[in-house]
């Protein structure tokens, strides 16, 4: 993890520092004006060809010109998530404003301009074209894309992006999480394409994302999921086989994980075991207790006591 900040730079030189060290050296983009009282900070990390960043800054405009592109060609997409404020992005006649919780996608091979709002915060992932193009070839038709905050699958994509900026991830975990993020971006950008016509990997991601969102719903079943996503139950079981688990084993594992998080949460110490079990989607306490003991080697009440006394 590497960080940059204007806090330690003389006020008159802050934007010059940001322009040369961050804009030019890191991202090969230009700036068109000198803003007053500029401040900014950024932290980045890289993993192989992947790069991730979180930045906060005063308002300023940066541009990727044809000259920038010719001097440093870039075979990547930038996936940008707006966390605070807004960013106005344009390319020729194509333009939009990326609002809080929106995600924008733009092509590093094309020129564009972007203006950040005052006190804006953004998270971005820079990924090779192949990771997006092989999953979502329809995105190649345009260079700029905006995925509104309420787009399907985008909530999980946002959580992935925040997680990817963490320095705690190793290279293997980073690669897997980035591939999942690209799957979710592909799904979010394909609202008019039936899920069962997408490649198998995307179908699996859609199934898992839907199940995670409804993990606490006791109605969650193969029939419930298949009906909502337009799959046959047979196709659903076939896709789960590719994950190395059955639907039932996956569901049990995730619900037990949810119970464990609640049982070790100090803010939930006043909730009884049955209440937690029911809230996590279980509707049979005898089955829950047996499954918990099989997984963790002790009943949930004892597991909670042991965890709390150790922490």
Image: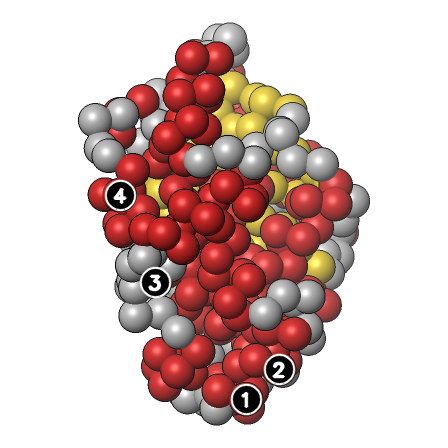
Query: Disc 3 vs disc 1: Cβ atoms closer than 8 Å?
Result: no
Q: Is residue 36 above or below residue 139?
A: above
- Label 1, secondary structure: give it: helix
Which one is earlier in the sequence, the residue at label 2 or at label 3?
3
Q: Is residue 136 above or below residue 149?
A: below
- For disc 4, the marked residue is 274
Q: CA distance from mark 4 to mark 1?
A: 33 Å
Which one is earlier in the sequence, the residue at label 3 or at label 4?
3
Q: Nearer the viewer, residue 147 or 85?
A: 147
Q: Quadrant of residue 273?
A: top left
Which one is earlier in the sequence, the residue at label 2 or at label 4?
2
Q: CA distance from mark 3 to mark 4?
A: 19 Å
- For disc 3, the marked residue is 214
Query: Disc 2 vs disc 1: Cβ atoms closer than 8 Å?
Result: yes
Q: Is residue 138 left or right of residue 113?
A: right
Crowd rating for badge 2 (residues with CA inside 10 Å; few <14, some 14–19, many 20+): some
Q: Nearer the viewer, mark 3 or mark 1?
A: 1
- For disc 2, the marked residue is 238
- Label 2, secondary structure: give it: helix
- For disc 1, the marked residue is 234
């Amino acid at each position: 993890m590497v960080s940059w900040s204007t806090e330690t730079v003389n006020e008159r030189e802050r934007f010059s520092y940001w322009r040369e060290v961050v804009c030019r050296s890191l991202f090969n983009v230009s700036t068109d004006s000198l803003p007053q009282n500029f401040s900014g900070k950024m932290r980045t990390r890289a993993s192989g060809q992947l790069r991730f960043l979180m930045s906060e800054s005063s308002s300023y405009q940066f541009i990727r010109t044809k000259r920038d592109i010719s001097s440093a060609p870039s075979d990547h997409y930038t996936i940008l998530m707006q966390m605070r404020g807004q960013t106005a992005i344009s390319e020729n006649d194509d333009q939009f404003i990326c609002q809080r919780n929106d995600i924008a996608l733009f092509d590093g091979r094309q020129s564009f301009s972007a203006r950040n709002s005052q006190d804006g915060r953004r998270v971005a992932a820079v990924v090779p074209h192949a990771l997006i193009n092989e999953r979502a070839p329809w995105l190649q038709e345009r260079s700029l894309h905006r995925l509104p905050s309420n787009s399907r699958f985008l909530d999980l994509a946002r959580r992935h992006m925040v997680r990817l900026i963490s320095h705690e991830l190793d290279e293997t975990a980073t690669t897997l999480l980035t591939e999942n993020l690209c799957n979710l971006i592909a799904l979010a950008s394909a609202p008019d394409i039936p899920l069962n016509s997408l490649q198998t990997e995307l179908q699996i991601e859609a199934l898992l994302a839907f199940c995670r969102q409804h993990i606490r719903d006791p109605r969650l079943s193969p029939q419930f999921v298949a009906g909502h996503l337009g799959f046959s139950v047979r196709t659903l079981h076939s896709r789960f086989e590719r994950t190395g688990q059955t639907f039932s084993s996956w569901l049990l594992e995730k619900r037990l994980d949810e119970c464990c998080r609640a049982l070790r949460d100090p803010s939930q110490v006043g909730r009884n075991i049955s209440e937690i079990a029911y809230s996590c989607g279980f509707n049979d306490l005898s089955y829950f207790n047996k499954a918990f003991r099989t997984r963790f080697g002790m009943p949930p009440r004892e597991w909670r006591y042991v965890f709390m006394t150790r922490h």
